[in-house]
Amino acid sequence: MTSIERTAYPRFKKHISKKELEQVYTPNQTELTFISKLARKSELRFGATLLLKSFQRLGYFPAFQDIPRPIVQHIAESL
């Protein structure tokens, strides 16, 4: 059976490894430059980064409350 992450309606995994957090959810310099041009306040940059990295993984923008805490914490630490 295909995992839920690989279906037409992907979702976040229940357990996200540290390796996956670093590989998938760490913003690179190009993304950081884009985000800094998009938003000036740090809160808005944080939210935009959460949505950007989530969209890259899922293919759609999730609600903020649906983003797992480990991803939120990892992105906050990355910024």
Image (tube, grey):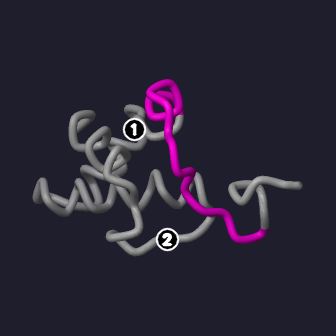
Could you tell me how far apart the alpha carbons at marks 2 and 1 are, in whole angstroms?
Answer: 16 Å
Amino acid at the residue labelled 1: Pro
Q: Is residue 73 left or right of residue 11?
A: left
Q: Where are the magenta residues, as a range?
A: 8-23
Q: Quadrant of the C terminus?
A: top left
Residue 5's x, y, as percent? 69, 55
**Residue 38 versus residue 57 in the image, above or below:** below
Question: Dot 2 lies on which element?
Answer: loop
Q: Is residue 53 left or right of residue 1?
A: left
Q: Is residue 13 left or right of residue 1?
A: left
Q: Quadrant of the N terminus?
A: bottom right
- Does the segment drawn in magenta span residue 17? yes
Residue 27's x, y, as percent? 39, 38
Of the two numbered discs 2 and 1 in the rendering, the one whose residue sits closer to the viewer: 2
- Does the segment drawn in magenta span residue 14? yes
| Pointer 2 with pointer 1, Cβ within 8 A | no
Q: Quadrant location of residue 67? A: bottom left
Q: Which residue is mark 1?
A: 27
Which residue is depicted at the point 26% across and 43% down?
A: 73
**Residue 13 versus residue 25 in the image, above or below:** below
Residue 7's x, y, as percent? 78, 63
Frontmost residue, 22 versus 27: 22
Q: Which residue is mark 2?
A: 61
